Amino acid sequence: MKKIVLLFVLFTYSFSIAQENYKYVIVPKKFSFFSDENEYNTSSMTKAFFEKEGFVVYYDTDQFPSELANNRCLALYVNALKKSNMFVTKVNFELKDCANKVIYTSIQGSSREKEYQKSYNESFRMALAAMKGQLNFTNTSTGNALIEKETVSATPIAVESKNVPMERLTAITIQNGYKLVDSVPTVIYELLATSIENVFTAKKGTISGTFLKKNTGWFFEYYQNDQLVSEKVEVKF
């Protein structure tokens, strides 16, 4: 059964402060390694992600509001880096301040899909999903020192939760990750380790996403029609 729930990030450190000071995010309408604007919907996908994180997002080609036009230091500037070869598409994100200083670098999203549409969508989704809830830094570019404190963020993130009836899966160790199998055994998920503990890049059939541990268990998360979908998975490691 599908239902839409609102998830609230409670008792986070500095996240609401970061949003208060970095009010805006600027996304390139055309990333430097593409020929066309919004190629493979990568710019719109990136814009949608930061909007769901609570920022006011503009493309770099948009006309900015006067507040931002008069003070570019209110914004974070998104840059994507491609480190691909003929077998793997690899993408990660940098967030820069108004002084062009890199203040955040995401983990690398990767894809072995041969079609460009699929490979770029998969690698972008993977890198974006890993940034969810990780933007806990303060803005010092305006010259105002900020004190980190415990606070409650009331910014809702819409997530489509799926309760998928499934038997408990078993994790089989492979090089750099796991295969999650049922009792047949059939491989249901393929997981590859990342640099973050309990966060894996994952594939379920043709669907690619992120497999991660939360307080209530393990979840497979992916984007579908610009909507973040979260599936709870019972698994024994």
Image (cartoon, rainbow, N blue to C red):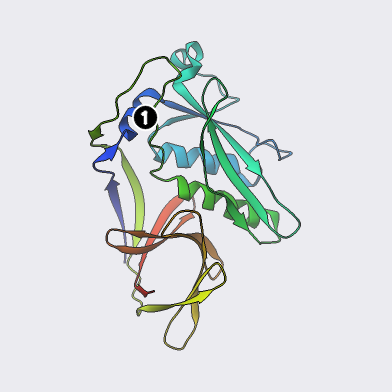
Percent x, y for residue 203?
53, 66
Left or right? Give the position of 49 relative to 60: left
Left or right? Give the position of 178 relative to 60: left
Percent x, y for residue 82?
67, 45
- Badge 1 is on which residue? 19
Vertical order, 115 against 145 (above or below):
below
Q: Residue placed farthest to the bottom in the image?
A: 184
Q: Residue placed farthest to the top in the image?
A: 70
User: What residue sits 66% from the left and 61% below the top?
Assistant: 113
User: What residue sits 23% from the left and 35% below the top?
Assistant: 150
Percent x, y for residue 39?
66, 43
Q: Quadrant of residue 164?
A: bottom left
User: What residue sits 24% from the left and 43% below the top?
Assistant: 10
Seen from the viewer's position, the closer of residues 215 and 161 is 215
Vertical order, 81 against 224 (above or below):
above
* Number of numbered discs overlaid on the protein picture: 1
The local crowd at label 1, few if under 14, some if 14 to 19, many if 20 or more residues have their Cα within 10 Å, is: many
Vertical order, 228 against 183 (above or below):
above
Q: Residue placed farthest to the right in the image?
A: 86
Query: Which corner quadrant holds the C terminus?
Result: bottom left
Q: Secondary structure at mark 1?
A: helix
Q: Amino acid at mark 1?
A: Gln
